[in-house]
Amino acid sequence: MSNLAINGGDKLRKTEFFKWPHYDEREIKYTEEVIRSGVWFSGMRGADPGTKTEEFEKKFAAYHDAKYGVACANGTVAIEIALRAAGIGDGDEVIIPALTFIATLSAVLQVNGIPIIVDTIYDTQCIDPDEIEKAITDKTRAIIIVHYGGFACDMDRIMEIAKKYNLVVIEDSAHAHGAVYKGTKVGAIGDMGTFSFQESKNMTAGEGGIITTNDPDLAEKCIQLRSCGRLEGESWYKHYIFPVNYRLAEILSAVLIAQLERLDEQTKKKNENTNYLAEKFKDVDGINPVPGDGDTDVNGYYLYLLQYDKDKFSGISRDKFVEVLNAEGIPCHIGYPWPLTKNPMFQKKEGSEEVPYTFPYRGGKIAIKDMPCPVSEKICNETVIIPHQVLLSPQSDMDDIVSAILKIQENVSELL
Ligand SMILES: Cc1ncc(COP(=O)(O)O)c(C=O)c1O
């Protein structure tokens, strides 16, 4: 008889963990207010006084220690707007980490910039400042860092490098709502921060994004860019700069106001549960929470990142382990299957000698596919990810995660 659920045995966890997306009466009340008001669109430049969008921008920016918030359609265009606001364009090199969602890279391509991909640090999974410094040339204009999974990047080093080489810093904080680095929330440390409110994120309206900044000029540029390049008080049909509609709808802003009201409490809960799990994992050979570097005061925990050592599971591959753990009723996934460089769009097409996405670099040429990132590759092969909503369940539910892993270890012979 088999014990493991994947082989027909009893599932260790039979009930669902915390369900995501989460809502209560507040989402319903605030969206009803929008519907009944008849104001479904937030205005010419995106956030007229009295709109839900204006209210959300003010509240989110204040919560994230920033003076200004500019809401927009999603986290991808938030990065694009930030790049355009900073004047990044044709041929400008922008340094980004190898371990991130494609949006961090595609936003650079959207402005005709050159994405220069650098490696990450094993113990934080965040961009490596030493690699940033090595990649800088006289064409480098900006760095987009990603607070990966909810850990904060080494912002002291990154800001020091940016100052030394006069570079713009954009904090892609799509994984890190609520995260705090040395006393300051992420998104308020670099020149601009960007956030996503897509459905899987720490707070969500299904879609949505925001740019945070402490710089009034950048905020003004972002406001203009988010709504067809218009200027305050000018005609609807006068467009002064890059003219695309990136606005956020009022109903989504209403949902986000409600979601923000729970963010602090939810972040606390996730940090409590991960502290509890870290103690429990001390007794599990072969699974270690990614340790971080000690400078993240509060982790945003969009992803709970675990390092998997297959040697402690009789050589069972990480992918198989994830399949078996899911079968036991513990939601988990592998995250990004590869660093950005390995995506199909960057590889040579069959029968063609042309290498797509090859750019001029240091007097020669470089293709995205050849930008080295061995640490990120290792991370992509070894990480097991538990999504944030699982960590919003009661502490007693955390025991099921550990018990399921121990069950797999005890019955690993069934998988050989
Ligand atoms: C690191 C990172 N940046 C940017 C984005 C883009 O956000 P959106 O999906 O809202 O466009 C995501 C979304 O998953 C992300 O993970």
Image (cartoon, rainbow, N blue to C red):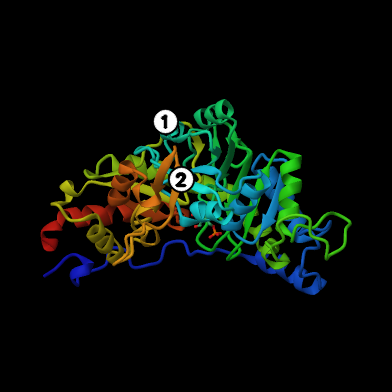
Visible in this render: residue 361? Answer: yes
Amino acid on which disc 2 is placed: Pro
State left or right for residue 47 relative to residue 162.
right
Q: Quadrant of residue 5?
A: bottom left
Q: Quadrant of residue 27?
A: bottom right
Visible in this render: residue 145? Answer: no
Q: Mark 2: which secondary structure?
A: strand
Badge 1 is on which residue? Answer: 130
- Residue 257 position within the rendered picture, expressed as x and y whole percent measured from the top left: 68, 57
Screen quadrant of the C terminus: bottom left
- Residue 181 position within the rendered picture, expressed as x and y whole percent measured from the top left: 54, 35
Amino acid on which disc 1 is placed: Asp
In this view of the protein, which residue sits in the foreground, 370 or 399? Answer: 370
* Distance Cα–Cα, label 1 vs label 2: 22 Å
Q: Mark 1: which secondary structure?
A: helix
State left or right for residue 112 relative to residue 124.
right
Asked if disc 1 and disc 2 are in contact, CB closer than 8 Å, the reply is no
Badge 2 is on which residue? Answer: 360
The residue at 52%/57% (across/down) is 201
The residue at 24%/44% (across/down) is 284
Q: How many marks?
A: 2
Q: Does mark 2 have its CB less than 8 Å from ligand 1?
A: no
Residue 366 — which label?
A: none
- Picture layout, residue 52 above or below residue 147: below
State left or right for residue 75 relative to residue 257.
left
Q: Nearer the viewer, mark 1 or mark 2?
A: 2
- Residue 324 position within the rendered picture, expressed as x and y whole percent measured from the top left: 24, 63
Marks 1 and 2, the one that precedes in the sequence:
1
